[in-house]
Image (tube, rainbow, N blue to C red):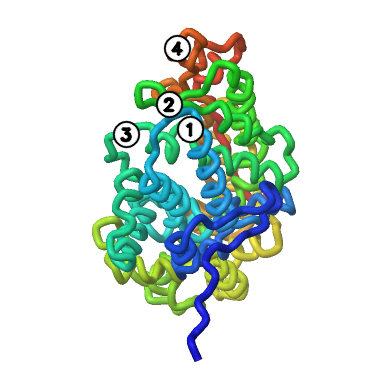
């Protein structure tokens, strides 16, 4: 009996866009690949669900949504006589589908603790190159666009710019799952207003208000969601849990963990020694490994690790204060001294429980402008074309300082 071939032109149902079509068998096979399936086990928003209980969507959701929006954008541009070949269309869909494949478990927490000096974009590129080997060079053009090496500049801008497909999906998606309506942008309207002029991705003049709303929505989402104080403190505690675990691992302490997590805790991994074996182990590491280890570490004999782990598991987090100015040395020292007494900590151990940092948010960056195509056919930076006075103000980075300490 002849083996039945699987139907590779599947349709997925997305809560935001409705039905999403997988455009061809290559993209289907990439989605089916274990590297990509791992994204189902990595949340898009880390610990934001400690604040917004609905924020449990994954990087997988986001990547599929981006691919869907990319197809829409290509159709709009082609309708406006912008030449995009089928090969370029396929490459754009692949590049946006894989743009986040290098995100680690709990994304930014992992980048700052057990893997050092390598960003998720660099890991994404390593995954893409490995997949390209497996798929016999069929990702060549996608990689060229992803790296910004393709001569057609606007192709890269669709993947990475201030008004790229990535942002159009995550703002709408994160707004939907958190219930924070301020972030709900009209991605359809923005895509419908896209055009290309002098090899630049531009927005037609009648879309100017949609761009203004997009920039303001992004600013509000950063302060209300991505940099929410509870999410901030939880992520920093996780970073410290992993740092403490790595410190204990270096001393030879036996820690409960999966084989993938063990590899990263018991080896010094940096950009210079990120080998194919490392990539393979990285592809097996996800949120589940981290959470199962943290749950077990609550009972570890090391009081620092145990206390930090229980803060995450029981949501009994550190206190956080945020302000515009830096905290005085005296205030910081007093918080340290109090914590040392309260929790019987040494001078070195207290660093895990009392720390200060800064956060910044720049809603609009003048170095990579969003261009408005005026009715006369000229290009004008949105910050100048807009009659919104506060858009100019949004180009200035806002910096805030925070301090965390035990309640």
Q: Point out which mark residue 152 bears.
A: 3
Instruction: Determine whether the residue tagged by mark 2 lies in a helix, strand or loop.
Output: strand
Outermost residue, bottom direction? 1
Cβ atoms under marks 1 and 3 closer than 8 Å? no
- Which residue is label 2 attached to? 196
Cβ atoms under marks 4 and 3 closer than 8 Å? no
Q: Point out which mark residue 377 bears.
A: 4
For the residues marked 4 and 3, what is the alpha-carbon distance in whole angstroms? 20 Å
For the residues marked 1 and 3, what is the alpha-carbon distance in whole angstroms? 14 Å
- Which residue is label 1 attached to? 77
| Snapshot quadrant of residue 323 | top right
Instruction: Determine whether the residue tagged by mark 1 lies in a helix, strand or loop.
Output: helix
Precedes in sequence: disc 3 or disc 2: 3
Precedes in sequence: disc 1 or disc 3: 1
Precedes in sequence: disc 1 or disc 4: 1
Q: Provide residue 281's location: percent of width, then percent of height.
A: 39, 71
């Amino acid at each position: 009996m002849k083996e039945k071939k699987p139907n590779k032109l599947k349709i997925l149902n997305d809560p935001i866009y409705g039905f999403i079509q997988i455009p061809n068998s290559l993209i289907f096979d990439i989605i089916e690949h274990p590297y990509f399936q791992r994204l189902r086990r990595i949340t898009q928003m880390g610990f934001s669900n400690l604040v917004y209980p609905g924020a449990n969507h994954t990087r997988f959701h986001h990547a599929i949504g981006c691919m869907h929006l990319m197809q829409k954008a290509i159709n709009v541009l082609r309708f406006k006589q912008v030449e995009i070949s089928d090969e370029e269309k396929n490459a754009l869909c692949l590049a946006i589908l894989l743009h986040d494949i290098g995100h680690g478990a709990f994304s930014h927490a992992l980048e700052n603790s057990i893997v050092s000096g390598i960003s998720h974009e660099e890991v994404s590129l390593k995954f893409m190159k490995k997949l390209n080997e497996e798929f016999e060079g069929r990702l060549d053009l996608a990689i060229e666009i992803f790296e910004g090496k393709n001569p057609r500049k606007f192709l890269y801008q669709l993947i990475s710019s201030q008004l790229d497909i990535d942002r159009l999906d995550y703002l709408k998606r994160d707004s939907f799952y958190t219930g924070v309506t301020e972030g709900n942008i009209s991605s359809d309207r923005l895509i419908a207003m896209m055009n290309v002029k002098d090899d630049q991705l531009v927005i037609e003049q009648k879309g100017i208000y949609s761009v203004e709303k997009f920039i303001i929505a992004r600013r509000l989402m950063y302060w209300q969601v991505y940099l929410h104080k509870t999410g901030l403190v939880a992520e920093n505690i996780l970073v410290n849990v992993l740092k403490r675990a790595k410190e204990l691992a270096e001393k030879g302490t036996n820690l409960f963990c999966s084989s993938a997590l063990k590899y990263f805790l018991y080896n010094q991994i940096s950009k210079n020694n990120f080998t194919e074996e490392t990539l393979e182990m990285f592809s097996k590491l996800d949120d589940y490994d981290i959470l199962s280890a943290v749950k077990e570490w609550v009972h570890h004999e090391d009081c620092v690790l145990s206390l930090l782990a229980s803060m995450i598991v029981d949501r009994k987090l550190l206190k956080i204060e945020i302000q515009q100015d830096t905290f005085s040395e005296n205030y910081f020292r007093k918080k340290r001294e109090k914590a040392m007494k309260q929790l019987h900590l040494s001078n070195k151990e207290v660093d895990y429980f009392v720390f200060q940092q800064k956060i910044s948010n720049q809603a609009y960056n003048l170095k990579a402008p969003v261009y408005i195509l005026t009715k006369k056919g000229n290009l004008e930076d949105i910050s100048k074309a807009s009659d919104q006075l506060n858009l100019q103000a949004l180009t200035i980075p806002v910096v805030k300082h925070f301090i965390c300490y035990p309640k």
